[in-house]
Image (tube, rainbow, N blue to C red):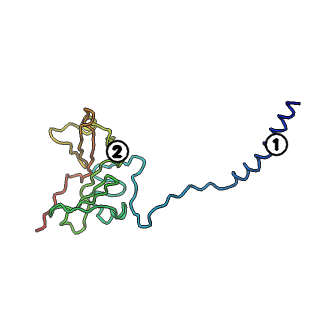
Amino acid sequence: MKNTFSLIILCSAILIAIPVFAQNSSKKQTPEKKPTPANSQTIKPNSGVNIVREGKGIEGIVVGVSTMDDVEKKFGKSYKLTAHKKYSYQMYYGGLGLSFYSCQSDKKKQIFVIEIKSPYKAKTSRGITLGESTVEDIQRIYGKKKEGLEYRGVGFYYNTIGGKKIVTEIDVIENFGIRQCKVSK
């Protein structure tokens, strides 16, 4: 009798659950939409690691080819523009960790340096990872230099963190080196 009663309760529970389950499974699951400000044009940092191409650039922005307008189209209007005396302009996307430089005297406003810092997730095409790799890694991969950490198409800066010299900035430059801007008078 006890087993029969348990079986009846189990069957009743199944019969009650089947229509509820069928009703819930037939509904299409749509992802929850997060509200965004209507005028927001800022692109958030990619959750993956972006590849930095030495002498080329990042995310379709190419040093020596792309302009300030191209950068604005790609990353939006939420940047701080700084004029460095009469030498260059800097488009600073603080939330992304990116800066783009152009010469003030350049009528095309071509980008000649892309400066990459945290929180941007970046790794060079040869494997140096921002915020992880060390100066020793750079020298092993790119070669030892007597001075500085500038190589063909790329430059590195570091800070000592926990006794290690960790890469904290990657600069993409043109293959022939950093462009020298003409100073407007």
Q: Label 2: few (<14), some or many (≥20) within 10 Å?
A: some
Q: Are marks 2 and 1 in contact (CB under 8 Å)?
A: no
* Disc number lying in front (2 or 1): 1
Q: Nearer the viewer, residue 110 or 87?
A: 87
- Which residue is at 87% across, 33% downward? 4
- State the SS at label 2: strand
Is 135 situated above or below 85?
above
Could you tell whether 119 is left or right of 14 in the image?
left
- State the SS at label 1: helix
Could you tell whether 121 is left or right of 80 in the image?
right
Tell me the number on the disc at residue 123.
Answer: 2
- Which residue is at 23% across, 44% downward? 157
Q: Nearer the viewer, residue 47 or 71?
A: 47
Find disc 1 in the rendering and name its residue.
Answer: 12
| Residue 7, quarter of the rendered image | top right
Of all residues shown, which one is farthest toward the left? 185
| Residue 124, quarter of the rendered image | top left
Could you tell whether 21 is left or right of 95 in the image?
right
- Percent position of residue 182, x then y: 14, 63
Is 157 situated above or below 56?
above
Q: Please name the amino acid that badge 2 sits on.
A: Lys
